[in-house]
Amino acid sequence: MVKKYLCCFICTVFSICCFSQKIKTVDGEYTYVVPENVNLDKAKYIALERLKIQLIEEEFGATVSQSNSTLVKNNNGKSDVDFVSIGGSEVNGEWIETIGTPRYNIYYENNMLVVSVKAKGRIREIISTAVDVKSLVLRNGIEDRFESDTFKSGDDLYISFQSPTNGYLVVYLVDTEQRAFCLLPYQNMKEGFFNVEANKRYVLFSAQTASSEIKPYVDEYTMTCTHDQEINQLYVIFSTSPFVKAIDDKLEKELPRELSNEDFQKWLAKYRTRDINMVVKKTTITIRK
């Protein structure tokens, strides 16, 4: 019996070592020359996101892919051959959390706006393949053809979501005032998560498409904009392992439950560090008046 348990223990430790993911602390700087059609808020966001990708790639590398296709067309007896090559790359890691506050240096050079950002954070190497979920942000419609990341004040927000396996889902929206609103689970649900069934398409925030059990709980959302343009971050968070939303409060009657973005990021970093099955789909939404 002792030998049997010892063997099981060694196998377990070996399995954990094989599938553990490296977590490292990194820091760096990125300089972004801003095109004329990009405003300052969006430029700061782009600079920071590119810095994150740069630091992950420097530490863990990137996977380069290329696909080729040949199309032969026959037109009045003449054959035309079109050759298409599509290449791309994907970094072999993910950004877990930002440590401290990113520092920006904004200046002009050769009559061009330049945004330089310095930041520090924790990154994780991606070893195992995450569940491939489908998540689309929809504007003023419940079909996938309404996918959009640009809204006008007064537009309705929906999310189309589908997973190949059962799991747990939450959705947050972070606004320009650094408030993180919990959009899902719905406000009157007692559970701290939303159950997802495998292979079922959900249209979140739509009472019209909700099942009879969920319909009474559905919150429907309309995007609003105080300034001429605002940039929000939408987080769709899914895992096959059980997890629950962050602790939040109901501060305003017309708004969802909320917490600070700082507390939300701490909550998210904690779960992402512990849960290798967690998938985070982050979408930048632009809202205009």
Image (spheres, rainbow, N blue to C red):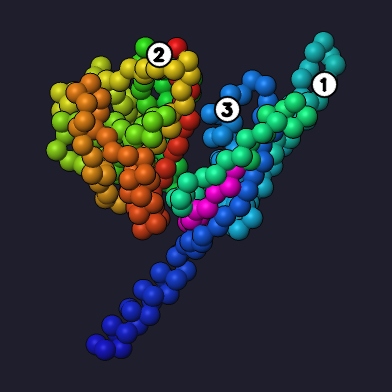
User: Where does the image place residue 259, in percent across and percent down from the top left?
Assistant: 28, 38
Dot 1 alpha-carbon crowd within 10 angstroms: few under 14, some 14 to 19, many 20 or more: few
User: Where does the image place residue 219, in percent across and percent down from the top left?
Assistant: 23, 23
Say what amino acid the circle numbered 1 marks. Answer: Asp
Return the disc, 1 or 2, that comes first in the chain's sequence: 1
Image: 289 above or below 104: above
User: Where does the image place residue 56, in percent across and percent down from the top left?
Assistant: 58, 52
Front label number (3 vs 1): 3
Quadrant occupied by the N terminus: bottom left
Say what amino acid the circle numbered 3 marks. Answer: Leu
Q: CA distance from mark 1 to mark 2?
A: 48 Å
Q: CA distance from mark 3 to mark 1?
A: 46 Å
- The segment highlighted magenta reads 117-128
Secondary-structure class at tag 2? loop
- Provide the residue designation for mark 1: 80
Residue in front for this viewpoint, 264 or 195 = 264
The label number, if any, that marks residue 40 in the structure image: 3
Q: CA distance from mark 2 to mark 3?
A: 20 Å
Asked if residue 286 lies left or right of residue 61, the reply is: left
- Provide the residue designation for mark 2: 153
